[in-house]
Amino acid sequence: MRPISTNPLVRIISPDDERYQEIKNVHDPISRKQLLKELIDRVRREEVLIQYVNPSFTQPKLVAFDLDGTLVASEFIHTIATQGVTPEVGKELRRLTEEALNGAKDWSHNYEKRVALLQGTSVKRLENIYQLLPLAEGAKELIASLKIKGIKTAIISGAWSEYAEYIARITSIEHCFATRWELDNGQVTGRISGPILSPEAKWEVLRQLAEEHQILPKDIVVVADGYNDLEMMTHVGSCILLHATPHHPLPLMKCVQQILCKEFTN
């Protein structure tokens, strides 16, 4: 059971251990964001899952998921770099993707450059790639359990909208927000169609979705793994930080399911 505290709590789950840690002096957005950044560093470095809980959090009413490294145990653009483009383009895609994953200062500009490199790529080829990406084990079961409890679910990702919508369909996630790419004659033009879901835009989309359903930020859980999710994480009641890979020793989505079910009954 989660301890009662007037300070934020961090719960760390590893293959061998589970413990809570009370965090003091984290009462403003700047210090909260710095702490969350350090926790993201940790889940990318160690084989752990971390839950961050604000003292105002009681029960989840909306759970928002990132896509790559969270619901999907892979990185879509990384996979394109190895399977869908020339070696030269693939090398640059990997470099830019690593830069983005490590917290690129201008995330939107980085994203535009990655999409530009995909000019002329067949949509069908990209569909073949994302349809073979592995879901995080237990993702479908997790979403089903949340729906039974009446908890709203959403994907909020900077990823390509067609890919994100496909994952939303096969997992039965209710809402999906992602970035649209311009397409022409079955190919990617290399341009963005509409707004990019930057870190700030992701939070704004989540805030508006919650407002539409009369859900307070303190009743939102964000499940994610990246620095571009920090803006969302900073404003919500609880975050679950993980980094899904095909060989992670923890059954990550099962752990998330257990955490959220406990919160719902506390």
Image (tube, rainbow, N blue to C red):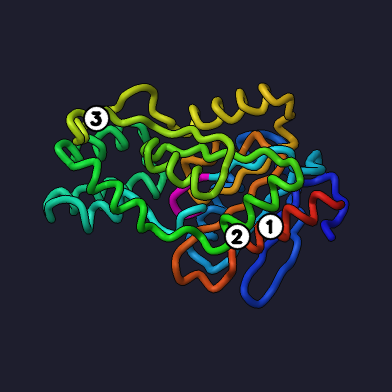
In depth, the one of 96 and 215 nearer the eye is 215
In depth, the one of 138 and 110 nearer the eye is 138
Marker disc for residue 257:
1
**x, y percent for residue 12:** 67, 63
Circles 1 and 2, Cβ within 8 Å, touching? The answer is yes
Marker disc for residue 21:
none
Q: Is residue 194 left or right of residue 20?
A: left
Residue that mark 2 sits on = 253
**x, y percent for residue 30:** 60, 35
Q: Is residue 169 left or right of residue 119?
A: right
Q: CA distance from mark 3 to mark 1?
A: 37 Å
Please tell me how crowded label 1 is: few (under 14), some (14-19), or many (20+) other residues with Cα within 10 Å.
Answer: some
Query: Disc 3 or 2, which lies upstream in sequence?
Result: 3
Q: Quadrant of the N terminus?
A: bottom right
Residue that mark 3 sits on = 183
Q: CA distance from mark 1 to mark 2?
A: 6 Å
Write the start and end of the magenta stretch as one range.
66-70
